[in-house]
Amino acid sequence: MSFLMIKEEEKGLVPCGIPYIFHDLGDVSKNMMGPAPFVAAGGEVLIDTVTEVSFKAKTLQTKSGLTFAYDKLVFATGSVPIVPTFIKGYDLEGVEYIRKSYEYIKALKQKTDLAKNIVIIGGGFIGVEVAEQLAKFTDKKVSLIEMQEYCLINAFSPRLTKLADTAVREQGVNLYTSAKVTEIIGQAGHVAGVKLADGTEIPAELVIQTIGYTPNTMLAGQSGLEMNSKLAILRDNYMRTAVKDVFAVGDCSESIGFVTGRPDNVMLASTATAEARILGYNLFKIGLIRTFSGTLSVFSTQIGSKVFASCGAIEQTAEAAGIEYISGEFEDWDRHPESLSDASKLWISLVVSPKTGVIIGGEIYGGKSAGEIINIISLAIQKGVTVYELVSYQIGTHPLLTTAPTKYVLIKAAEFAMSKIKLFGN
Amino acid sequence: MSFLMIKEEEKGLVPCGIPYIFHDLGDVSKNMMGPAPFVAAGGEVLIDTVTEVSFKAKTLQTKSGLTFAYDKLVFATGSVPIVPTFIKGYDLEGVEYIRKSYEYIKALKQKTDLAKNIVIIGGGFIGVEVAEQLAKFTDKKVSLIEMQEYCLINAFSPRLTKLADTAVREQGVNLYTSAKVTEIIGQAGHVAGVKLADGTEIPAELVIQTIGYTPNTMLAGQSGLEMNSKLAILRDNYMRTAVKDVFAVGDCSESIGFVTGRPDNVMLASTATAEARILGYNLFKIGLIRTFSGTLSVFSTQIGSKVFASCGAIEQTAEAAGIEYISGEFEDWDRHPESLSDASKLWISLVVSPKTGVIIGGEIYGGKSAGEIINIISLAIQKGVTVYELVSYQIGTHPLLTTAPTKYVLIKAAEFAMSKIKLFGN
């Protein structure tokens, strides 16, 4: 048995680490990730591009002229930045993207080092994180433009997105919200600035577009795999496409929301790796029955010293999907007593189905521990834990590490949610 | 309806914060906790001591001569330090304890400030934490004496207790392990040092005994409540004693191990608060059926910059209880890429039932995030999560907050455990 991975570039990047190349890490070489563990496990790697696949012949061809036969074929082609060809000036020199490519990001890092005025278009996670990093250079003017009322609007409730905007501004980013880019202004073929719908012009030598990603499924489409309207490859719970022995995993494949049971558009490395594990264990026969069905988006990021995290159905996604919900909120210190020097406030919200008490989502705002507390909520959602259960959940607490046992944030939020359920309310 | 809390001292302390009074917090006033939330919710507080209870008459009497009738009576009398009367010199002046009393600890803080040579007897959590704090004063010589081969031997496997001992020594504590105190040496009625079984004499002006705690159940015993051989009050899953309308909760009551189903000796604020919530919801009628049965010890502490955490059945407790087990271990960085400046190593072990794959325990060693990751494991144990489930568990990761999604520690440890299960091994 042999395993071959065909990839376009030899060097790989830790995808979520890319924003930190621009400041905290300082260099693209500090954010590398390669197929070494795969090779160590006996896999082979070929640097090449697949140009054609025949499902009938079970073969594929590469750019360099090689032909391979396969028993099992996995599409893990990821996603690529959306290029807004509808915006005038999108093709000017100096208009860049955050591509998951070592050579590309290496070149982009040099460009950001030289630029003094940088505009970033799109206030999703990548836009916010890149802006936060670049703003740490005090000699750069960094502007971030978001079409919606707040940044990160797909991941957090308005309460947190407001705080996120504040945190972004406190980092020295010039944030424009409810702002639409109508044109990227050029001068002699090179970008000179960005023009907004209200007439504002922001000068820039460098524009980075972070408006979103689209599945990289050109080859899959040409090969005849079924795709959804967002061009994500259709697959089942075990990553199997409708074509025998052909699989799709990660950003290039369709994810189905854990709570809603309908397609969402989640592209997260953490989700992709969970899918990859499921695929790996079930490539030949389904041996490991999947008990956590569907995709649960678990988001976390840090802006300045503040951490924002969410998972599952938050208020507006529950609303949009027509899900009845209540929420329980609680705020406390992440150390006890709070007089300890590194204590910071921790705010938490649990979104709960009021008929059953099942936890369907959650959000956290606070210090670094939020990054793991969100994973407690994510496990609770995946296991269908109710607030009735969570109120007697036994936890570990320590003055230097957590909130106090008398008011552990998750338990208190569950209590507040429970008090809103009519059966337990007054 | 009225609620009355009778307590001996007006001011209360955050119990787990007590060790940090001696250095990090600096003063007892920084570690206060009182019944204010109880009073705000309509409760009344009486500073007094209950001297007699009649279950038949449903009344109780206090030291100050008051008599109260009750509908429901809760024993939440906690625990008191074990005083080793079998050790010569135990009653000398300058032999102290860690009592959960504001006035006592206030006085002890002053004594530690004056003392230059301090010996702490007993390397459990409290002994280790107090020693670590006192050793931060560079002008003090702090010695910690532990009878067993390593400190913290009831909470961690030998692998971690070895690291804990190293961490304790790195903090400047003179640690004596496998060392038995045979005598506390006195001079004119005041402590002058400690003598070990091997003849070593350690001079000291102050000796702090932290050899353990015993349930504070004198009153309960006199009242006729049934107790176990450790003098903990017997109670059921809803904190009800055998006497109608009489409850017992926390350190003074018997805890039953979650995994073993037999009495253990756990005294943790986090456990006590979980029990208190269960009691609170079920005081009049059992309305909130308990789904997490038994006591799950979740331990965490920090020595220097290193965090140690464990929960459920670890190797030696599984061994002692005759539980078949395997374990899966994994180590990685708690940030990704690890070149980020605050990255530290995170080591994790999951203890697993090999016939079912159910997770029964876990241990973590690493940075601060261990304090919340142990709560993911604790939820997994309480919900009977298997390693087969955990390998497809969807998590949130972020470079600045967690391990990489490709090798999230919990999932990798589950994978390694799974590989040891014969069905999935080779």
Image (cartoon, coloured by chain):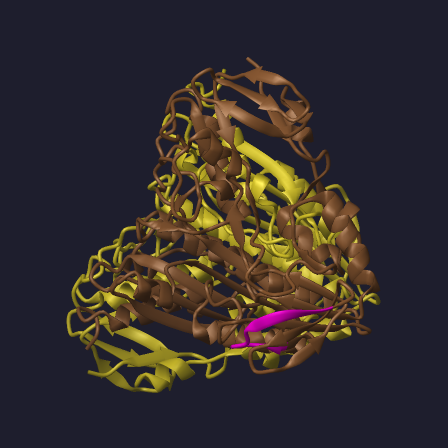
Chain colours: A yellow, B brown
Q: Residue at x 70, y 60 (%)?
A: B92
Q: Above or below — where is B74 with respect to B264?
A: above
Q: Judge from the rendering whether residue B287 lies leftward or rightward of residue A235; answer left or right.
A: right
Q: Residue at x 73, y 53 (%)?
A: A340
Quadrant in the picture for the N terminus of chain A: bottom left
Q: Residue A159: x, y in percent?
A: 64, 37
Q: Residue B409: x, y in percent?
A: 44, 67
Q: Above or below — where is A388 with respect to B306?
A: above
Q: Residue B24: x, y in percent?
A: 75, 59
Q: Residue at x 70, y 74 (%)?
A: A111
Asked where in the image residue A260 lies, by quadrant, the reply is top left
Front residue (pair A167, B408): B408
Front residue (pair A366, B231): B231
Asked where in the image residue B183 lies, by quadrant, the reply is bottom right
Q: Above or below — where is B263 with respect to A356?
A: below
**Which residues are drawn in magenta?**
B175-186
Front residue (pair A13, B298): B298
Which is the main secondary structure of the residues drawn in magenta? Answer: strand
